Image (cartoon, grey):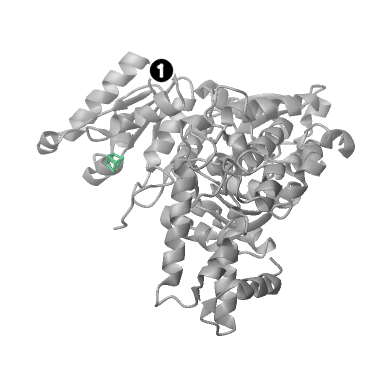
Amino acid sequence: MELTLWTYEGPPHIGAMRIASSMKGVHYVLHAPQGDTYADLLFTMIERRGKRPPVTYTTFQARDLGGDTAELVKGHIREAVERFQPDALLVGESCTAELIQDQPGSLAKGMGYEIPIVNLELPAYSKKENWGGAETFYQLVRGLLKNHSQNQPDHKPTAWKSEGRRPRVNLLGPSLLGFRCRDDILEIQKILSQHGIDINVIAPLEASPADLIRLTKADANVCLYPEIAESTCIWLERTFGHPYTKTIPIGVGATQDFIEEVHKILELDFPTAKEEIDQSRLTWYSNSVDSNYLTGKRVFIFGDGTHAISAARIADKELGFKVVGIGTYSREMARQVRSVAKELELEALITNDYLEVEEAIKECAPELVLGTQMERHSAKRLGIPCAVISTPMHVQDVPARYSPQMGWEGANVIFDDWVHPLMMGLEEHLIGMFRHDFEFTDGHQSHLGHVGGSTKETEAAQSQTIQDSIDSNRADHLPCWTSEGEIELSKIPFFVRGKVRKNTEKYARQIGCQEIDGEILLDAKAHFKA
Ligand code: SF4
């Protein structure tokens, strides 16, 4: 048993729903209790789709448990196939149905339908949404290709040369409820076509079962979202000899590496690096003098594995931030995130407990949080600027405008989105110099439309600061602050004040001092070079 208030991922059948809803011609019969239809809202409200997901729920109730629930499942399968006439059928269970073990997949297979039927076995008590999505996609691809293609591990990714055509690749992984997938695929498609590379199939988003059968016609696979597509890419490589890309093109450097990797796989001539860099404005914007004040800003990163790793590279190498914390809730990608953390001399936080993440944020007192919708809430409570870089997300992260994260335009979007929550350079200096302005008060960010004085958020942040100060002055919490020390502390710009408070207390403890005045604070600053 685990006490849970917020979860980063839903149960695995939500992952299966994401695959079914992303595709065309696929229907999903889900054995689930009454009430599980809540999941429809993820697609109709967050993704703002104009149609219901292609899911038939058995919606059994307590009184059905006394009867024949297996017959109930068969009835719903019959109804779904007759009404929707899908090209392929997924059959699976939700968490509650898993307990009654009706085995709906086997029941469906015994009903004599001609269409491919995929029996999903998703262990709801040990796996989560992304795993469920990956497993569903893999089982569907495997189920469809097994009967249609001969194994051909002698596949050559350079066959396009002898066949006198342009090379073509599959884009694998984009799905509904993924982070900005809709625009990422447009951006990657554009970049690849500029390099003379065609797209064979994009899947699962907008693909049909017939498209999946064509997957083997590509020269190589581009794995855009490993959380969803890596297991399928590995299987395609093992079974048909199709190589796949390992670089995720988020950020300028990663996009360059990605293009280079695709060229190497397909044995295409690689274009000059200079032309490539100029395609995104991020490099010039972050080199321009206005971005000087961004250098060394302390940033905390949390999200799914793919986006956390990409964000760390951009923050560290392309924006000059200092990454002070990194973590992921994707246990499947824990190893990769740990190795990135190691390069940054950090210890990765691998958890799906948002309170643990909030504690870690408090501990390293960053000036910017790059996280999920959960971290947006935590950062708001702590009064720290935040940008969302990964799912879980809310409706505002499925915007109407073009907003990729991948490729050159994705880097432009990232630059704007990450810098926007920070106080602008001039305002930062002025507030540091003149602390008694009636409008541009401590913590005020006029570019975010704050109307002078305090807002709800700054009030919350201030009450947190007051609470911190009360906590640190408790008798059992030595050293304590003198009023002179507090006044000195209040002169520190608000966004680094938490860090300075912590460092000073640490320093005072180290030297055995029980009271912190202005002098100790200055000594601590010198000690930590802060
Ligand atoms: S079956 Fe699972 S998803 Fe559905 S209500 Fe129960 S716990 Fe939630």
> What percent of the width, then of the height, locates residue 258?
74, 40
Instruction: Identify which amino acid the numbered label 1 is placed on.
Output: Lys
Instruction: Check disc 1 and report the residue beneath it.
Output: 51
> What percent of the width, then of the height, locates residue 293?
74, 49
Residue 300 against residue 374 in the figure, above or below: below
Q: In the drawing, does residue 286 fall left or right of residue 337?
A: right
Residue 51 against residue 329 in the figure, above or below: above
Q: Quadrant of the N terminus?
A: bottom left
Mark 1: secondary structure: loop
Report the front residue among 515 and 464.
Answer: 515
**Residue found 65% across the figure and 30% down from its top:** 170
> What percent of the width, then of the height, locates residue 330?
50, 50
**Residue found 61% across the figure and 57% down from its top:** 496
Report the front residue among 39 and 454.
Answer: 454
Crowdedness of circle 1 by 10 Å Cα count: few (<14), some, many (20+)? Answer: few
Report the front residue among 25 and 296.
Answer: 296
**Residue found 66% across the figure and 27% down from its top:** 217
**Residue found 57% across the figure and 31% down from its top:** 181
